[in-house]
Image (cartoon, helix red, strand yellow):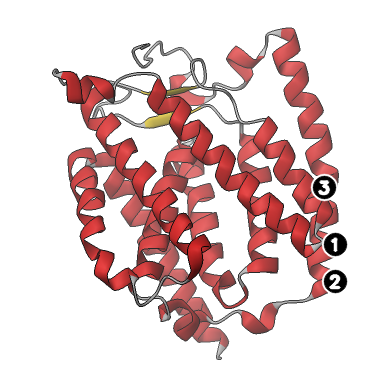
Amino acid sequence: MEILQYILAMGGYFVILLVITAFMRKNYKAANIIWIASLLTFPLWLNNVEGWFRWAKTLSVLLPTIIVGLSRVATIENKSGKFWQLFQRQWVMWFLYGILFLNIMEATMKDFEMGNNLNALCGVILCLTIPYPGKFWNVGKNMNKGGYGDLVVYTTIGWNLLYTTWNACFVYGETGAYFASSLCIIFAAELYPIIKRRPELYVMTRVYTLATHILIRACWGGVFPQIMDASTWHNEQILQNWGVINGLICVPYALWFIWQLHTGKANTTFKKGELRNTNNKMKVA
């Protein structure tokens, strides 16, 4: 495959993901409708989703994305009624926290199976250092002129970067032909919060980029290997060295994370950007 084709395909997909993220963030009602309607594509999944793992992955990404959308609408518009109030409560944040934890742990177990043990260690550290809901997760209101109702998770810049290199290493070892397209969603999720100078938007960006990718794969499974096949990129030595690097850098990050919590500095060091002093939190059930 020509290098130019990779550049055009990956560059085009990367830009599309950034545009989709910006649209989903700024148009929370439309985003909610789109992801609910995405379930209507279910008949197409039958030809493209194989095995229980892929089915579980597809549903475990799309359904939480819908819950994010319902929570954003309910909170930003201060909806009344039992249905909408349900999505204004703290269980939503704990549910999304659990989904993030399980998605990382799922890949971590796969890393252990593949023998990439130090990268798996990095996955464990990532799970243990996800800031917990209640203090570090919320759907905010009136956070900027548009009042977008962002899903805000006060992960640190360090956690975001660690997740990026860990996830890229995992995908490199596991997905083969889909590595190039997966790199696009990994780096789009990293770049958008950097552009906005708001690392707390990382998880929301990751939600929308991953959901887009998963939906495309479920509906048109062979499109990515056709336009950016990365099956020939694999090199076992690169994979092992990459895992070693990730395993080494995750340890000092874990120590720093523990120290921030121990000294009580986490309230300020985790909360970067324009949301540092906001008190917008979900209603507690």
**Residue located at (59% from left, 25% from top):** 131
> Which structural element holds mark 1?
helix
> Which structural element holds mark 2?
helix
Relative to 187, say whether 235 is above or below: below
Which image quadrant: the N terminus?
A: bottom right
Residue 143 sits in quarter: top left
Instruction: Please give the label number shown on residue 241.
Output: 1
Question: Is 9 in front, or is 250?
Answer: 250
Q: Counting residues from the N terminus, which is met first, the one under dot 3 or under dot 1? A: 1
Q: Amino acid at mark 2?
A: Gln
Q: Badges 3 and 2: C-beta atoms under 8 Å apart?
A: no
Q: Amino acid at mark 1?
A: Asn
Q: Amino acid at mark 3?
A: Gly
Instruction: Please give the label number shown on residue 237.
Output: 2
Relative to 160, say whether 240 is above or below: below
Residue placed furthest toward the bottom = 1
Residue 75 location in percent, x, y? 25, 23
Horizontal arrangement in the rendering, residue 172 relative to residue 282 (left or right): right
Residue 94 location in percent, x, y? 47, 26
Q: Counting residues from the N terminus, which is met first, the one under dot 3 or under dot 2? A: 2
Horizontal arrangement in the rendering, residue 262 relative to residue 187 (left or right): right
